[in-house]
Image (cartoon, rainbow, N blue to C red):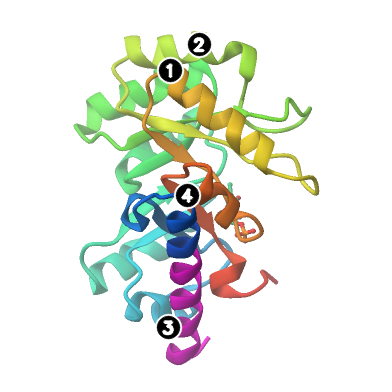
Amino acid sequence: MTPDEARIALAAVQTRIAKAARTATRDPADTTLIAVSKTHDAEAIRPLIAAGQRVFGENRVQEAQGKWPALQAETPGIALHLVGQLQSNKADDAVALFDAIHSVDRPSLVTALAKAMDKADRRPACFIQVNIGDEEQKGGVAVADLPALLAAARAADLPLAGLMAVPPFDIEAAPFFALLAKLARDQGLAGLSMGMSGDYETAVTLGATHVRVGSALFGQRG
Ligand SMILES: *Cc1c(COP(=O)(O)O)cnc(C)c1O
C-alpha cells in the first residue's frame, strides 16, 4: 500500500462511518475505528500510521509482540486492541501489550486476566465476547451464560468496557447487532464492539462504539 492508497482507504472508511452515524443521529466521534492489521507486516502498517490512524487490532498475541513494540517506539500514542481468542497462559503477555481486550469469554480467563492486571498494575479495557448466533465452534460466551460471566468479571473488578460479537457468516448481521446492543443496554454496559469490513456501517447505525475493520483498509489478506 502506498501512502496515498492508505490515505484514500482510511478516508473512505471514516466517511462511511460518519455517514452511517448521521443516519442514526449519532455523533461520528462516538465510534472508534480499529484498524485490524493481523497478517500484515510493519511495512504494510506504516502507511496507515502515516495517514493518521492510531488504533489497531490484532488477533494473536505472539504476532502482535513481533511487530508492534518497534512500531510503537517509532510513533507514540498508538493503542492496540486484541480482537482474537486469548489463552489463559498468555494473559500476562496480553495485559502487557494491549490497551483493550475484546475476547473475554469464560470464567477461567476472567480469573487469569484479573491476576495478570494486579501483577502488572495495568488495566486494559475488557469486552465480553458473546456468541451472538449461538454457533457451535465459535468463540464467545453463550447468551444464556452472559449474566453469570458478567457477574464474575465484576466480582474480579475487571475494567468492563462492553460487549463484543462476530455474527454468523453470510447472513444478515443487523438482527445480531441489535441483539448485542439490547444485551449491553440490559446490563448497563456502554461499549459495543461490532462490525467488520462487510457490515461496519450497519453496526454503526445500530450503536457500535468500536468497529473492527481489516480488509477494507489493508486489502484482502493473503
Ligand atoms: C479479522 C477480524 C476482523 C476484521 O475483519 P475484516 O473482514 O478484514 O474487516 C474483525 N474482527 C475480528 C474478531 C477479526 O478476527
Task: State which quadrant residue 56 falls in.
Answer: bottom left
Find the distance from the CA under tag 1 to the CA under tag 4. 22 Å
Provide the residue designation for mark 4: 24
Of 114 and 52, the residue lying toward us: 52
Whole-percent x and y of residue 159? 30, 27
Kindly check if marks 1 and 2 are in contact, taking CB atoms under 8 A apart as contact.
yes
Look at the picture and state if 108 lies above or below 198: above
Disc 4 element? loop
- The numbered dot on residue 147 is 2
| Among numbered discs 2 and 3, the one appearing first in the sequence | 3
- The numbered dot on residue 187 is 1
Q: Residue at x 49, y 14 (%)?
A: 149
| Mark 4: amino acid | Ala
Find the distance from the CA under tag 2 to the CA under tag 3. 42 Å
Asked if residue 23 shows in the view, the reply is yes
Task: State which quadrant residue 160 falls in.
Answer: top left
Disc 2 element? helix
Find the distance from the CA under tag 3 to the CA under tag 1. 38 Å
| Mark 2: amino acid | Pro
Q: Which residues are magenta?
A: 1-16
| Mark 1: amino acid | Gln
Kindly check if marks 4 and 2 are in contact, taking CB atoms under 8 A apart as contact.
no
- The numbered dot on residue 175 is none
Disc 3 element? helix
Kindly check if marks 4 and 3 are in contact, taking CB atoms under 8 A apart as contact.
no
| Mark 3: amino acid | Arg
Q: Which quarter of the rendered picture does the C terminus lie within?
A: bottom right
Provide the residue designation for mark 3: 7
**Callout 1 crowding tier (Cα within 10 Å): few <14, some 14–19, many ≥20:** some
Whole-percent x and y of residue 146? 54, 16
